[in-house]
Structure formats: C-alpha cells, structure tokens
Amino acid sequence: MISVGNSYAWNLLAVTVMGFQCFVAGTKVADARKKYNVDYPDMGSGRFAAKLSDKDWTEFNNIMRVHQNYIEALPFAMAVVLISGLFHPTQSALTALAYIVGRYVYANGYSSGGAEARLTGAKISMSALFINFLSSLIGIFNTLRSN
C-alpha cells in the first residue's frame, strides 16, 4: 500500500515551481517577440523571423528554444518527481531542486550564450531527471514485489 505523508508537500511545491519556471520562460519569449518584432504565430522560422538579421534571429531562437525545450521535458519531469516522491519524498524533492537549478542555469546559458552555453545546465537537469526516473522505477518495482 502506498501512503502519502506530509513531506510529500515538498514534491508538490517542486512541481509547482517547475511549472512557474516554465511560465517565466514563456514570458521571456513574449518579451523577445516585442524586442525583435516577431508576431504570432511565427515560432522563429516564419515570415517575421525571416526579416531579422542573423544575430537577431539567433538570439530570438535561443530564447524560444529555452521555453520550447522546457515544454518538451516538463510532463516527464513532473511525473517522475510526483511518482518517485510517493516512495522517496525527501530524495525526490531534493533532486527536483537540482532539476530546477539546472533548468535555471540552462536557460541563462542558452539565452545569453547560445547552444554551447546551455550544456552545464542540461547536464545538471538531465542527471536529476534520470535519478528521479530510476527512483520511480525502483519504488514501483519494490511495491509490486511486496504484493
């Protein structure tokens, strides 16, 4: 039987912060749209973006990729925090904190220094994601074996 204790609230806080962090990345895209004059629905490769200089196009797309990459990873990241938190709430919440820090480093690096500058943050966040994924599997398998 799986029971949820009060410490699970840290996992809920972590996924809430992750969602907010993704939202903030979206506001940076909105700011970049205004700065570079790239209207909707252009995602960085349409008619509006085609009018940008190479430098401005790269800067806009770096900011866009930060947000898009977060959207791509967020469902899995939230799922493994919530699932692993059922079995190892403190470890899961601390690993989620590492993920959040990694995403912050990733976003700052990518938006200010390009694709190469995102690698440190990517390594931190992907390591944390993998740890919570393994923790989820271990918790699930241990629960199934105990039945």
Image: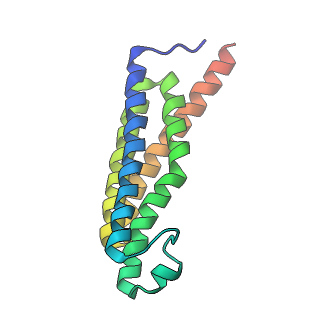
Q: Nearer the viewer, residue 66 or 44?
A: 44
* Residue 4 x/y as whole percent: 49, 15
Q: Residue at x 52, y 77 (%)?
A: 45
Q: Nearer the viewer, residue 20 or 48?
A: 48
Residue 133 appears in view: yes
Q: Residue at x 37, y 47 (%)?
A: 21
Q: Is residue 16 above or below residue 60?
A: above
Res 83 → quadrant: top right
Q: Is residue 71 above or below residue 145?
A: below
Residue 115 appears in view: no
Q: Nearer the viewer, residue 97 or 55?
A: 55
* Residue 99 x/y as whole percent: 40, 45
Q: Residue at x 42, y 57 (%)?
A: 122
* Residue 36 x/y as whole percent: 35, 76
For the N terminus, which image quadrant?
top right
Q: Residue at x 62, y 26 (%)?
A: 140
Q: Is residue 146 above or below residue 61?
A: above
Res 5 → quadrant: top left
